[in-house]
Image (cartoon, grey):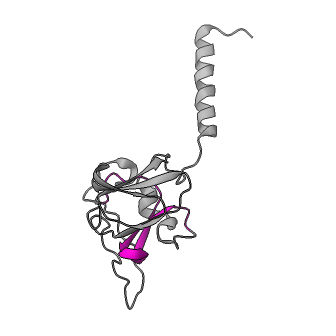
Amino acid sequence: MKLNMKSRFVMAAVAAAASTLVMTPSAHADGMTPNTGYENQWSPEVCKDPDSSGFKFTLYFNSNYKGSYRNIGYSVWDFADERMGGAPQAGLQPLRYCTFGVSSPWPGSGQNIKNNAASASNRHHKFVAHVYYNRGYKGAVDWVYGNRNLTNTYNNNASFAWQDS
C-alpha cells in the first residue's frame, strides 16, 4: 500500500503523539518535573514523617527542626498561593503546616508557611533547595544542602525552588 505525503505526515504525527504519551514519566519529586500545585497541596507525602516521605524537602515552623512541618516535592512560586492546576481560582490557596497533636497542637500546626519557616531539611542527593525571601524565586536566599536553620529567610520566606547542585 502506497501512502501519499499527507498520509505519511499524519501517521508520523500520530506515532509521535503516542510515543510521547507512553514515554512521559509520571510526576515525581525529582525537582525538574513541572508542578501542578495539586501535589504540594494534597499529596499524602506532605505530612508523612520526613524520613519516609517521597518529598525530599521539609520546612519547619521552629528552629532546629522542631514544631510542625510540611514536606514539599515541587518548586513553589508563592507559598501564599499554590494554585492547583496553575489556573486561577477564587481566593488564595496557601500552603500550610501539617496539623499534629489534637489535644495539644504542635507549634505552627495549620498555620501558613509563608513568612513562618525557621529551619529546613533537604534530603535530595542531586538538587539544592533554595528558599527565597520573595515570591517568584527572588530576593535573599538560603541554600539548603542538608539540615539548617534559615538565616537570610528566617520567618521571611515566600518561595522555594530546586536547583541542580
Residue 22 as seen in the image, left or right of residue 80: right
Place residue 90 in its image quadrant.
bottom left
Q: Residue at x 71, y 8 (%)?
A: 2
Give the percent coordinates (x, y) of residue 141.
32, 54
Q: Residue 37: give x, y in percent of width and height.
A: 40, 54
Q: Quadrant of the N terminus?
A: top right
157 vs 27, nearest the viewer: 157
Vertical relation: 113 (above or below) 106: above
Start and end of the magenta stretch?
53-79
Magenta highlight on residue 76 = yes
Residue drawn where x is 61% and y is 8% of the image: 5
Q: Is residue 102 magenta?
A: no
Q: Residue at x 67, y 10 (%)?
A: 3
Query: Left or right: where does residue 18 sit relative to residue 110?
Result: right
Q: Residue furthest bottom?
A: 103
Up/down of 28 relative to 97, above or below: above
How many numbered marks have been drawn onto this rendered protein structure?
A: 0
Residue 110, image quadrant: bottom left
**Is 105 or 88 nearer to us in this picture?**
105
Q: Residue at x 36, y 48 (%)?
A: 86
Question: Can you say whether 133 is above or below 51 in the image?
Answer: above
x%, y% of residue 131? 36, 57
**Residue 23 locus on image (x, y percent):** 63, 38
1 versus 96 height, above or below: above
